[in-house]
Amino acid sequence: MIDHLPALQVVIPLIAAPLSALFRPGRAVWLLAMTACGLSLLIAILLLNQVLTQHVISYPMGSWPAPWGIEYRIDAANAFMLLIVSGIGTIVMAFARPIVEQRIRLPEYKQPWFYTAYLLCLTGLLGIVITGDAFNVFVFLEISSLSSYALISLGRDRRALTASYQYLIMGTIGATFILIGIGLLYVMTGTLNMMDLAERIPAVADTRTIRAAFAFLTIGVSLKLALFPLHLWLPNAYAYAPSAVTAFLAATATKVAVYVLLRFFFTIFGVNFSFETMRLDLVLLPLALVGIFSASVVAIFQNNVKRMLAYSSVAQIGYMILGISLVSVTGVTAAISHLFNHALMKGALFMALGCISFRIGTVQLDRIAGVGRAMPWTMGAFVVGGLSLIGVPLTAGFVSKWYLIVGALEKSWWPVAVLVLVTSLLAVIYIWRVVEAAYFKPAPEGRVVHEAPLALLIPTWTLVLANLYFGLDTSLNAGVARTAAEMLLSVGH
Amino acid sequence: MRQYPIPRLVTKLLLPLILLFALYVQFHGDYGPGGGFQAGVIFGAGFILYALIYGLDEARRILPPWLLRIGVSLGVLIYAGVGVTGLLLGGNYLDYGVLDSHDPVHGQHLGILLVELGVGITVSAVMVTIFYAFAGRGR
């Protein structure tokens, strides 16, 4: 069975999804979904171990050999991504049951559909990451996107519907652009297999079609990963989605899009074409810098804490793109490492917000006054997550910021390094606004708030402790990230 | 539509043909144009036509939502199940060649037939479900 792990990685959540639609609401369906998530996490760990010793795993779907059939191809970069997606998927699923029972806008008999959509979204995200076929990327992208539109629309606030619709329009435009890009590549090379594409593109690289494909893919993927100024769908979608959904999507969906960007530009087009012929770094660098700065400033002025963190996510994506646009091993290491670290910190922060909204029904800044005293564990989780977001030493967030600054200094880009530090101070401001409201303002008269239930606190604190653990032991989030970065950068040469 | 005999009669005449054509597109899809997706849409469209002419309640009596709910899941399970059967018989996921121990070509035929059947079931069930959801709004 060990040979079939690449297929099972996607197939287990895929089968669990329709099965859970057949269940009655209650604990059983959650257990099924939880088992599926846990199994895919286990498989991801096994695959990562296997990849670190034997470098590449190739699995032909339906036994059709690689350039003709669909190949699942796993190397250090996507094995690391599989771990992020399935790990966050499992922890958020552990968190989701009380939220599904009380905090989503679905009649009780339809609650199992939540798990169906969630598992389909997980299937899609894992599929995008694991596949070695460019068209397959699009198919899985659609699976994950469609289910995430459904998940976002389940928020209690009716504005979740318009937010979801807005995301649907923007996401569909992005997916269409990606499809057009892949189609143009197919026209020029006659293949869809990524490795095969990488071999055949150089011969036809100097054509308008390939350049157009490059442009379409850049815009399409940038829409999906919410690169400034294409991020406008993100704040509403994150703010109004149910908190479990926000935690899951914030920690995985945009990360997977960043992975797609890495895969297309480094593996398929190659470093030389993307960054020396097309000079993509000249486009990405300013957008990343403006995105980091403006989104951090906007975050300071938000009164809905979820929206604040959503803008912060746009800024954090800017850090990843900044790392990529350095086009050096250190820079790409920073980007990949930040994929992991940001998943940990945003997951923890959004789950802490989920605990708060579970008890008081809102996360407006003026309404969470005094929550620090009533919910010490929840706010403790928020503070540690916030410190990690700022990049305080001994937290996971510090690791990626460190690599980013070192990467900028290697190129002697002093202003970039300074900007990274300054925007970290902006993060201090917006996190502080929440801490101040929760700890230093008196609670409204007559409100009795209890600590969140253990079912919510345990998954939240699991992620919080992971933030601390990976701040100290960086063999995974910096070591494996570096292996992946070296692998991505050497492919094009 | 109760007072319009012509649409009601024409629907009654056409409906079996539409459903039969759907089955033809489904099972002849291996050799000609067609396949599970197209067949599912035609099959679903047949029921939607019936619901338009004879009313939502009548259609719901024939094709109740609980049955659709099973259909939506069942198709995906058939598809994924065929893939897993390939795994259990010693091939790769979705390897149809191992489905028939004597003749791999026969196995490929069987595999694609079952997979397309799964697609057909899910697509037709989803089509009717979406129609029910829209038609049932505001009731």
Image (tube, helix red, strand yellow):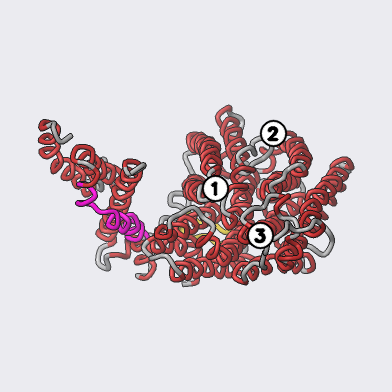
x, y percentage for residue B131?
32, 43
Q: Chain of mark 2?
A: A
Callout 1–callout 3 Cβ contact below 8 Å: no
Pointer 1 and pointer 2 on the same chain: yes
Residue A321 visible in the displayed image: no
Kindly report the distance in space between the C-alpha atoms of the residues bearing marks 1 and 2: 20 Å
Between disc 2 and disc 3, whose residue precedes? 2
Instruction: Please give the range of residues in magenta.
Output: B58-80
Please give the residue where the numbered disc 3 appears in the rendered image.
Answer: A356
As drawn, the residue found furthest toward the front would be: A446
Residue mark closest to the camera, 2 vs 3: 3
Q: Chain of mark 3?
A: A
Residue mark closest to the camera, 1 vs 3: 3
Could you say which is closer to the camera, residue B55 or residue A422? B55
Please give the residue where the numbered disc 2 appears in the rendered image.
Answer: A277
Pointer 2 and pointer 3 on the same chain: yes
Residue B51 visible in the displayed image: yes
**Eyeballing the image, is A66 above or below A327?**
below
Residue shown at 29%/48% (left/top)? B124
Kindly report the distance in space between the C-alpha atoms of the residues bearing marks 1 and 3: 44 Å
Count of picture labels: 3
Residue shown at 18%/34% (left/top)? B1
Q: Amino acid at mark 1?
A: Met
Please give the residue where the numbered disc 1 appears in the rendered image.
Answer: A194
Q: Residues within 10 Å of mark 2 (few under 14, many from 20)?
A: few
x, y percentage for residue A145?
51, 47
As drawn, the residue found furthest toward the top would be: A208
x, y percentage for residue A401?
80, 53
**Eyeballing the image, is A436 above or below A192?**
below
Q: Amino acid at mark 3?
A: Ile
Could you say which is closer to the camera, residue A221 or residue A165? A165
Q: Residues within 10 Å of mark 1 (few under 14, many from 20)?
A: many
